[in-house]
Image (cartoon, rainbow, N blue to C red):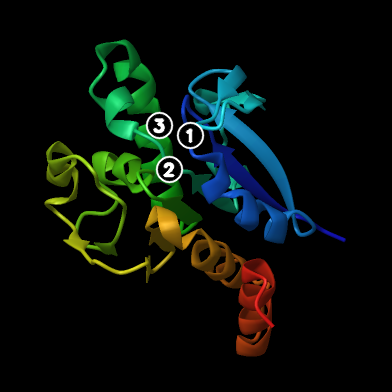
Amino acid sequence: MYKKNAYVFLYDEFADFEIIQALLLLRDSHNLTTVGFQKGLVSSICNLKVEATMAIEDVKIDDVDVFIIPGGEPKDFIRNEKYSEKIQILNDKLNGLARNGKIIAAICGGPTFLANAGILDGNNCTASIDDEGEIKFYEKSSFKDTDYVLDKNILTAKGHAFTDFAVQLAKLCDVLKTDEEVEQTRNWLRNVE
């Protein structure tokens, strides 16, 4: 069976629990590749050590079918001069993905990377924002106070909506094809009968 390619962007203190259900749903249909600012171990918010097997500059746009960004504190990287070159590379990659119609999915604070790259400009989006200083990242977008927003090929979600994020991403990636499959999967993930 042919598998598509899902790239997961990892950075220190990323919220691992917000993407685990999405990765569970994509695991059989997508090759999962971890990407970081550089190759090597990255510590999640739960202190889970995960290896980024690829540096962001090595990502080839044509190889990507879906690009996933978990929550965390992107503003800490965006505002840190030490990361300015890597942030520019990430911005260039995100813009390339958007221009080429690739699926981009970001949850909780993750959409801040998208806003910083300018790909949310003029689009609907949502995120979990806990710092008033972050709101400037979203000034050019139409920010919605909903659990998730799908605008063209870009899915954004609040951190507490990780189940809806997973289900909507699986639907967007053609893993879940019918409304019945979506509802059954949502109930299974929530342990609801």
Point out the tag, 1 or 3, that comes first from the N-terminus: 1
Residue at 34% over, 33% down = 73
Under circle 1, the secondary element is: loop
Residue at 24% over, 66% down = 145
Look at the picture and state if 103 lies above or below 8.
below
> Marks 1 and 2: CB-CB under 8 Å?
yes
Under circle 3, the secondary element is: helix
The residue indicated by pointer 1 is 14
Cα distance between the residues tagged 1 and 2:
6 Å
Point out the tag, 1 or 2, that comes first from the N-terminus: 1
> Marks 1 and 3: CB-CB under 8 Å?
no
Identify the amino acid type marked 2.
Gly
**CA neighbours of label 2 inside 10 A, class few (<14), some (14 to 19), many (20+):** many
Mark 1, mark 3: which one is toward the viewer?
A: 1
Viewer-proximal residue, 15 or 173? 15
Look at the picture and state if 156 lies above or below 172.
above
Residue 56, label in figure: none
Residue 71, label in figure: 2
User: Would you identify the image quadrant in which residue 59 lies?
Assistant: top right
The residue indicated by pointer 3 is 90
**CA neighbours of label 1 inside 10 A, class few (<14), some (14 to 19), many (20+):** many
Number of numbered markers = 3
The residue furthest top is: 82
The percent coordinates of residue 98 (x first, y second) are: 40, 52
Look at the picture and state if 22 lies above or below 14.
below
The percent coordinates of residue 170 (x first, y second) are: 62, 66
Identify the amino acid type marked 3.
Leu
Look at the picture and state if 99 lies above or below 168.
above
Residue at 67% over, 71% down = 191
